[in-house]
Amino acid sequence: MAVVLYPKKPVYPAEGELKVHFIDVGQGDCIYVAASGGNMLIDCGEKSETPKVIYYLKNMGVKRLDHVIATHPHSDHMGGMDMIISSFDIGEFIIPHLDDEDIPTASYFVHFLDAAEKYGVKLTEAAAGSKFAVGDAQCEIVAPNSRKYKEPNNYSVAVMLRHRSESFIFTGDAEGVSEREMIASGRIGKASVLKAGHHGSDTSTSEDFLRAVCPDAAVISCGAGNPYGHPNDITIERLSQYTDNIFRTDLCGTIVITSDGSGLSVTTERRSR
């Protein structure tokens, strides 16, 4: 899998291409998917990082986001979603189902709800098995598969994306419980690229899940010198049994994987140390 340094200005996909941008937002998640005729944003990182995301997208001329997914209500994934809503025309906005007692009272979530109401953005609850298109790529929501979890990370909306013969799975912070449910659902399978769950924590990317997904490459979104020890050595060891192509935002910066439907290429902001 060829790796080159990414140009200073991100490039929009050519006809027939799909580009998946794993935007470096430090200790958080932000993924932008673009194809001819459609796009999608999954998470946006902390509020402090969201201006960087907005600049990155607008630098490519993005004015509308056809699909936005807030995987779960943690600030390192959706801390600045109110700013995203106020900066772009939004099509479909997907969030997980949350019982009243699980809805955060933190200011970032209140501001998100206020922005959605102010700009008339309808919030759609994720339904496992539902499908939608991003350009010529087909997406299916594969998690969550239950309506109640003890661990909020397991509410994460996970998406399986297929672009002809290539495929990606984005898992948010889904942990072992949700991974087992995804396997049992029969909705997941071999993936070209796995976005490792929960920043490479050892509570995600289980052996059973890796056996089901069998990735050719993996991306870990995490911050340099983060206090959680992400990614965990155990996770790296498990991933290494399946692929040598492990890319980390703490080392590589923003990572862009391009699919032409029959092969992948990778560009990174900087060379890993």
Image (tube, rainbow, N blue to C red):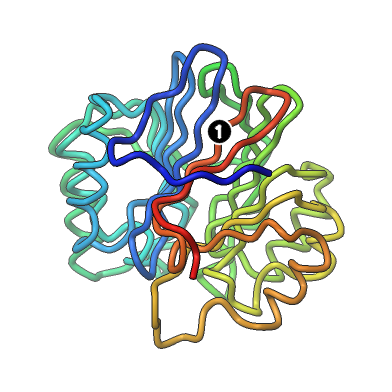
Instruction: Tell me if residue 227 comes above or below residue 2 in the rendering.
Output: below
Q: Residue placed at 42% from the left, 40% from the top?
A: 32
Q: How far across and down, in percent of the image, does residue 211 sit?
A: 86, 59
Image side of residue 101 versus residue 207, left or right: left
Instruction: Tell me if residue 88 comes above or below residue 142 in the rendering.
Output: above
Instruction: Tell me if residue 180 comes above or below residue 212 in the rendering.
Output: below
Q: How far across and down, in percent of the image, does residue 102 sit?
A: 42, 68
Image side of residue 136 versus residue 64, left or right: right
Disc 1: which residue: 258
Q: Nearer the viewer, residue 188 or 50?
A: 50
Image side of residue 243 versus residue 87, left or right: right
Instruction: Tell me if residue 157 comes above or below residue 57 in the rendering.
Output: below
Q: How far across and down, in percent of the image, does residue 1 sit?
A: 68, 44
Q: Residues within 10 Å of mark 1 (few under 14, many from 20)?
A: many
Q: Residue placed at 57% from the left, 25% from the top?
A: 132
Amino acid type at image mark 1: Thr
Is disc 1 placed on a helix, strand or loop?
A: strand
Q: Nearer the viewer, residue 116 or 4?
A: 4
Q: Residue placed at 79% from the left, 61% from the top?
A: 209
The number of discs equals 1
Q: Nearer the viewer, residue 4 or 201?
A: 4
